Image (cartoon, grey):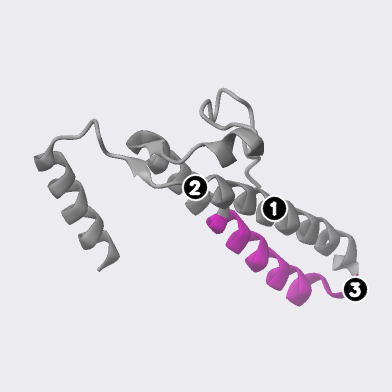
């Protein structure tokens, strides 16, 4: 299983919840990093769910200890995801040109399709 790096170096813009409540925007790069981090957490959560299903099928009664660890891991991932979701703010696009904004908007529309 992948261990997440929660250090200040991994997410240098991450701040306390008090500071986050005062802040209204992120830079574009910070918003992208936050989105990538949240996507990673979702994938890790899905992996633990798949591991739980496999453990129940293959290990039966011996899986209790393993399932407890997976459940604890899922709860930790959910808490971290919730914390990041609470920090999410609209990106500050003031540093981008109009052409950059249009290109980014088009890229995001294509990703959603």
Q: Earlier in the sequence, mark 1 or mark 2?
A: 1
Q: Is residue 5 magenta?
A: no
Q: Position of residue 28 (x, y in %)?
A: 33, 38
Q: Nearer the viewer, mark 3 or mark 2?
A: 2
Classify mark 2: helix, strand or loop. loop
> Which residue bears the numbered disc 1?
79
Whole-angstrom CA distance, mark 1 to mark 2, is 14 Å
> Which residue bears the numbered disc 2?
88
Q: Are marks 3 and 2 in contact (CB under 8 Å)?
A: no
Q: In the rendered structure, which segment of residues is drawn in magenta?
A: 42-61
Q: Residue at x 41, y 37 (%)?
A: 26
Q: Residue at x 81, y 64 (%)?
A: 67
Whether residue 60 sits left or right of residue 79 in the image: it is right
Which mark identifies residue 7?
Answer: none
Whole-angstrom CA distance, mark 1 to mark 3, is 28 Å
The C terminus appears in which quarter of the rendering? bottom left
Q: Residue at x 63, y 27 (%)?
A: 7
> Which residue bears the numbered disc 3?
61
Q: Are marks 1 and 3 in contact (CB under 8 Å)?
A: no
């Amino acid at each position: 299983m992948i261990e997440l790096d929660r250090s200040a170096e991994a997410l240098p813009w991450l701040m306390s919840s008090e500071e986050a409540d005062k802040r209204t925007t992120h830079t574009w790069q910070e918003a992208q990093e936050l989105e990538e981090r949240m996507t990673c957490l979702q994938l890790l959560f899905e992996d633990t769910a798949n591991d739980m299903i496999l453990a129940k099928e293959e290990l039966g009664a011996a899986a209790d200890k393993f399932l407890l660890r997976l459940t604890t891991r899922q709860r930790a991932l959910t808490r971290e995801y919730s914390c990041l979701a609470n920090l999410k703010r609209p990106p500050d696009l003031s540093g981008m040109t109009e052409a950059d904004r249009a290109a980014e908007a088009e890229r995001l529309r294509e990703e959603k399709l």
